[in-house]
Image: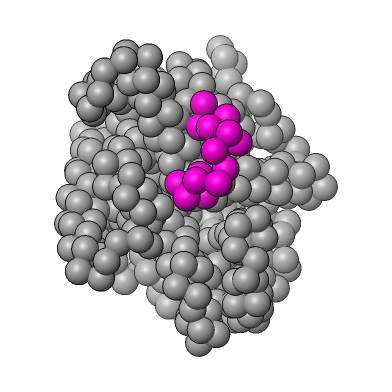
Amino acid sequence: MVVLEAAPLAARRAVAIGTGGVAAIAGVAGAVVAGAGSWIPSYWGDEAASVMSATRSWASLGTELARIDAVHGVYYAFLHLWTSVFGISELATRLPGVIAVGFTVAGTVVLARQFAGIGFAVLAGLVCMMLPRTTFLATETRSYALSTAAAVWLTVLFVHLVRRKASMGLWVVYGFAAAACAYIFLYLLMMLVVHGVYIMLTRREAIRGWAFGTAVALLVSSPIIVLGYLQRSQIAFLSRSNLATLPNIFVMQWFGSAWVAVLCWALIIACVIALVANRRRYRARLALLALAWAAIPTLLLVAGNLVVGMYNVRYLSFSTPAAALLVAGGIAVVARGVQRRSGRTGVAVAAGASATLLVALAALAAPEYLAQRSPWAKDGGSDMRQVSEFLGAHSRPGEAVVFDQGAKPTRNPRLGLHLYPAGYVGLKDVELAKPYQDGNKLWDDINSLADSRAGLATATAIWAIELPQGKTVPPDVVYLRSIGYRVDSSTLIHRTVIYHLIKE
């Protein structure tokens, strides 16, 4: 492999032009692959938080962020502007994630090219666009795709500064860039630790610049750090959810399925063994950087989870490019080994081995890719869009609608009223006490059914949208029966049952 540092100036310019073109093509391909079918799954609760926050007025959004979700404030503000132009359909709100996936793949190519040849850079880009965590990011109206793109491009900048022995002024730019990343997703500050470890192990002469840039980053991001700490109770449930399990860490975090994980971890192990055996080689530094990037944030979150609750598989999405680089490194190691054992010269044998492993990865990832794009892909089968479509086809103006008050907030069928309002036109929302736009909470304030009895009395019929547990009759339906209604019909959509009740 040709090392860029040894290339003459003219060659460097040619390589830069070529690298930019290849990265752009890879980025577009990654966005197309990830974006295909991204609009198919129905929204779920976390996406509801994004969409409902984005559709608030600026004043209302400020009131919300003062109480909760301040760490997502920049993303919500961006989405507010975006949805004012493009609307709140799944295609519209997930499109920024699709674009961000393209930038992630392109950034992975550029980062790999800073250490290795263009062939390996393309290989890394292909692996990145195939990983199930990458393709998942394009189907979520959350900030994780943007934070992943931000992490890889911050690392591109970091490596560039380290290699050119940058001035303190350029390290200030790095500090501001890292702070901007923190406002997108607070946990991206862990990239400063990753970069620091890399410098300590490989380029200690750059430690002063990194330290200065880190100080700038922490100073500029201090407001969001303080707000995140003050609102830490909003993720306290993570400590009770037992999410930091071995299957989550080693399978779901980046790989989505056991078979993909087995192949990828085998390749990562091969890459790490080669790193230890050839640690003096320049490309080994890329593997070291990727290993730190994959391991350190995971270890920090798992350790933090023991105390306050910090771990979620989606929070480690920003390490996906690192996993891709390690897997690509493993493919390269295997390909070189096959070539040596074959006794043949040239690149044909190595290319064939690489292609075989890429095809295997694509084949193993394909079922997960398709599952991510099924109508019920979110949160164990969210069906809010289909519920709205059913009500739009069967309800009549003047009828009332009530929602399962026993469901947890992120699964409450009421969210569909705001995400898919077309199906609820003409229905009376008798439980509503205060709409979310008028308060400082994520969700509506609602009354109990007993307190909503006056509104129920004026309705010609009632639709009860429920998430039943087993064969037990939902408490809402039991109460409605007690005040003189009977079930006219019940329809199972996917996980939601829609009851139509009329007066006796």
Q: Give the range drawn in magenta.
A: 270-286
Instruction: Single out the residue that lies furthest toward the right.
Output: 307
Looking at the image, how many numbered discs can be counted on the residues? 0
Q: Judge by depth and name the residue closer to the eye, 274 or 41.
A: 274
Name which residue lies at 29% across and 24% down: 350
Whether residue 208 is visible, yes or no, is yes
Q: Judge by depth and name the residue closer to the eye, 371 or 202.
A: 202
On screen, residue 61 versus residue 32, left or right, reads right
Instruction: Single out the residue that lies furthest toward the bottom.
Output: 169
Considering the whole magenta stretch, tell me its main secondary structure.
Answer: helix
x, y percentage for residue 488? 37, 21
Task: Indicate whether residue 274 is drawn in magenta.
Answer: yes
x, y percentage for residue 270? 52, 26
Name which residue lies at 60% across and 71% down: 206
Name which residue lies at 43% across and 56% down: 152
x, y percentage for residue 70? 58, 68
Name which residue lies at 40% across and 52% down: 115
x, y percentage for residue 194? 61, 56
On screen, residue 393 versus residue 180, left or right, reads left
Task: Indicate whether residue 221 is drawn in magenta.
Answer: no
